[in-house]
Amino acid sequence: MKFWISLFAIALTGFLTGLYFPWWSFAVPTLLIGALMPQKGAGNFFSGFLGIFLLWLGLTLWIDSANGGLLTARMAWVLPVGGKVIFLHLLTALVGGLIAGLASLSGKYLRSLLPKQTH
Amino acid sequence: MKYILALLLTTLTAGLIFVLNKPLGALPPLGPLLSPQHGFWQNAEPRDQNYGGALNLPGLKGSVQVHIDDRLVPHVFAENDEDLYYAQGYLHARFRLFQLDLQTRAAEGRASEFAGDKALRFDREQRRLGMRFAAENALLEVEKDPLSKQIFDAYTRGVNAYIDGLTFADMPLEYKLLGVQPERWDNIRSALLLKMMARNLSSSTEIDLGMTNAKSVFLPEELRLLYPQVHDSLMPIIPKGTVFEAPAVKPIRPPAADSALFGQGGLEPVIAEEKNRPDPNNGSNNWVLAGSKTKSGAPILCNDPHLELSLPSIWYEMQLTGPTSSVYGVTLPGSPFVIIGFNDSIAWGVTNSQRDVKDYYRIRFKDKTKSEYWFNGQWQKSSLRIEAIQVKGQGVVYDTVAYTSMGPVMFDESFGDSLSRGENLAVRWTGHDPSNEAKTFYYLNRARNYNDYESALQYFTCPGQNFVFASQSGDIAIWQQGRFPARWPDQGLYVMPGEDSTYLWQGYIPPAANPHAKNPEQGFLESANQRPVDSTYPYFIPGRFITPRGVTIENKLRAMQSVTVQDVMDLHNDYFNTLAEDVRPLLLSYVDRTKLNTTERRYLDMFEQWDLLATPESKGQTIYECWFDSLQAAIWRDDLERVKPSAPWPEEQTTFEWLARAGERMPFIDDRNTPSTETLSELVTTALQKATAFLLPYEKEGRLNWSLFKEPSVNHLLRDALPSFARKKLKVGGNGNIVNAITKSHGPSWRMVVHLTSNVEAYGIYPGGQSGNPGSRFYDGYVDTWVEGKYNKLWLMRRSEADQSAWTLNLNPTN
């Protein structure tokens, strides 16, 4: 449950910060959410990773379909994905997901540095 | 342990962000580029994007309605002229910002800011030619004139209103890819854009340096035949038989000219050379038919300027309606006004005059500081201009250019060929002279009749242009307009001594003596970059004239009667190869069939049966081009390679006419590198054999068809850097010498037909689209229409028709 709540919160805050702040700004709420909702094992990494991965993938698929695939067909030869549009989507989502996964995990470990009683 | 982990992970996260925020080798910063809410995804416009709406913009006086049609052409309605040009600036920036910015920075010699040190040579050349100096002189003229200043200021405010409202997400894709920022607009940048047009159109119309080199090998009479002033087959713009008045200005040939230009002192070859010469095919066609020649009885005007084809296109279609004008046509992003177009009374179009308005003078400096040069018997002070070139990723590179009374010293020991021996060459160019060409367009946009047109032209100095004109009231006319030096014979063909004022230009041809014609008996006028007049014109007017297209157009128009709009559209798209029509009998009469093998004979048959049309499917055109090229090489290479470092090649027309006149007696036929004496028949035969050998691999790949061989393309402005933003391998024929003048990446950049009936009817097409955004469906939408030779109907919208537009954008002043 904690996994899904943090995944959803990370995606939502990621979307909102993206509207107003620089491209990497989702990392800040992601880290905070990771700190507020620490999970066992790799749970933090994956809630962060999937939260942004799915958000970005959803956005790019939506944008691409509204655009009729015009720009991705051209960009797939500019970026090193060998003309494969699907890799453009995956590369984008992977970049966002990786940063978010690490940010969420960083949050968990940063929290563990805090004195226990403040919780 | 947890400390280390926390530190490690946080650093890793921040580090990843940091790395993705920076360029990675050749790749742009990936983070901002890939983010769906910031990066290139934001440039992917929804297909159902709404271009309408309402905006409050600073600096507007009243409100402006922009009715945008379903081709994304804005029809601007403004209450006053300032707001009209403000809106034009805003829309240029909205749809073509990267183009505006790149073209004017490049004009100034700042391309390195985008491209790094590979553009440094280009930038230095622009600066050494004095592009900024030229624009500053033009801007002084603009600012002296309150009307022009007001309009330029308004245009600049409009561009900046758009730039100031930009977020990273809205920025044109190219900025995100290059990792650079847009720069705010300034009046000088509009001046720079117009000077860039001047450079492109009047800078490769001389071959002075190459001619100077050629002097070291060829005799003066040979030079006259190699680079003739008037071709035998010339059909001039001004109908033959027109009587010209005696010259009002009679330039005096310096007594020492012969020895200075052709004697011992003049034998020194010039080592310097321009590397970035504009395409010599920067030509164009225009013609106009009087009512007596048309089916409707109303004049028809046509124009197709041939320029580098690019995405976005150099042109942007617009309607500009204000209190004093309502005009439709193509505009140049970066400049106010419609450049080629029509209103409800008149239409106009332009072609390049190809006249030589740029000369070089050899300068003697006192010492290495270049602060003094020898002139008229004393040391004169030069002014030194320090050029600071920002190179992307490398800081600033400095260059110093000395300015003399003749102009900037473009070439010196620091700039020229690697073999340079320190020749100092100053360049005298009419593009440097104070002028305000924009005013011509201001008045043409508002012209109602012939007199308005004629008076609008007086402001046009450089580049020399052929302005063709037609009015609803039935007048047709053409003027070759520009400021042209009055030269003594041979003046300006070669580098001249720069130590003595007798070699300077002594005056200009009076504007009234510029070639012109109005309502000729023949009922039509045309220009296609040919020499404007026959040899009876009383001034010496060198240039790089192109003969064949004018011959084709003249012949076709003469034969046409009851001309319709469809007829002239067919002429725009005409593939007839006039030069090949002349050359073919010559090649066929000299080729020795007994020496050919089966394949070569097969190629000869294809050529013989060719219909002389350079259609995309034509194989005969491909064989013709390769055969004649190969023959040209056989005739000239051995002679020209004696010239160090190089001499210009004679034109195809010249080679043909010489062979037609002299046949076997043409003096350059023999290959001096062989002991035997070659005959023309041997050369023609060997040339066919070579052409066949060259083309056979193409044929095996199925690429003998002219368009498959030539592979015409419309490239993105950044060319090879973004091949997927281009449209390649287009199925079009044509060539530089053919009316439909499409070469590999160059050709009819705008085709326009205006039928001046009581309700003006007009058609146009350019190979691009209204939006500069590669993520828009309007980016390249016209390319296919252009390839098919079709046109869009041009809609000079009335206010009452505004409800038929697709979108309306209201621009209102901020309170």
Image: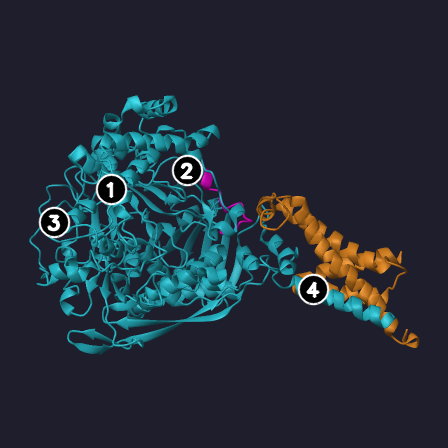
Say which residue label 1 marks: B672
Q: Are marks 2 and 4 on the same chain?
A: yes
Camera sees residue B90: no
Work out whether mark 4 precedes mark 3 in sequence or the reverse, and give the earlier one: 4
Q: Which chain is cyan?
A: B
What is the three-letter code of the residue carrying label 2?
Lys
Relative image position of residue B350 (x, y in whole percent): 28, 49
Say which residue label 3 marks: B537
Looking at the rendered image, the quarter that the N terminus of chain B falls into is bottom right
The CA span between labels 2 and 4 is 46 Å
Relative image position of residue B512 (x, y in whole percent): 14, 55
Marks 3 and 1: which is nearer the front?
Answer: 1
Work out whether mark 1 precedes mark 2 in sequence or the reverse, and give the earlier one: 1
Say which residue label 2 marks: B710
Give the colour chain A carries in the figure: orange
Relative image position of residue A9 (x, y in whole percent): 80, 60
The verdict on residue B780 being magenta is: yes
Q: Are marks 1 and 4 on the same chain?
A: yes
* Badge 3: chain ID: B
Highlighted magenta segment, given as a residue range: B772-784
The CA span between labels 1 and 2 is 32 Å
Say which residue label 4 marks: B17
Could you classify mark 4 by the number of other residues whose Cα lies within 10 Å: few (under 14), some (14-19), or many (20 or more)? many
Give the quarter of the image for residue B412.
Answer: bottom left
**SS of the residue at dot 3?**
loop
What is the three-letter code of the residue carrying label 1?
Arg
What is the three-letter code of the residue carrying label 3?
Tyr
Marks 2 and 4: which is nearer the front?
Answer: 2
Relative image position of residue A94 (x, y in whole percent): 72, 53
Could you classify mark 1 by the number of other residues whose Cα lies within 10 Å: few (under 14), some (14-19), or many (20 or more)? few
Q: Nearer the viewer, residue B157 or B33?
A: B33
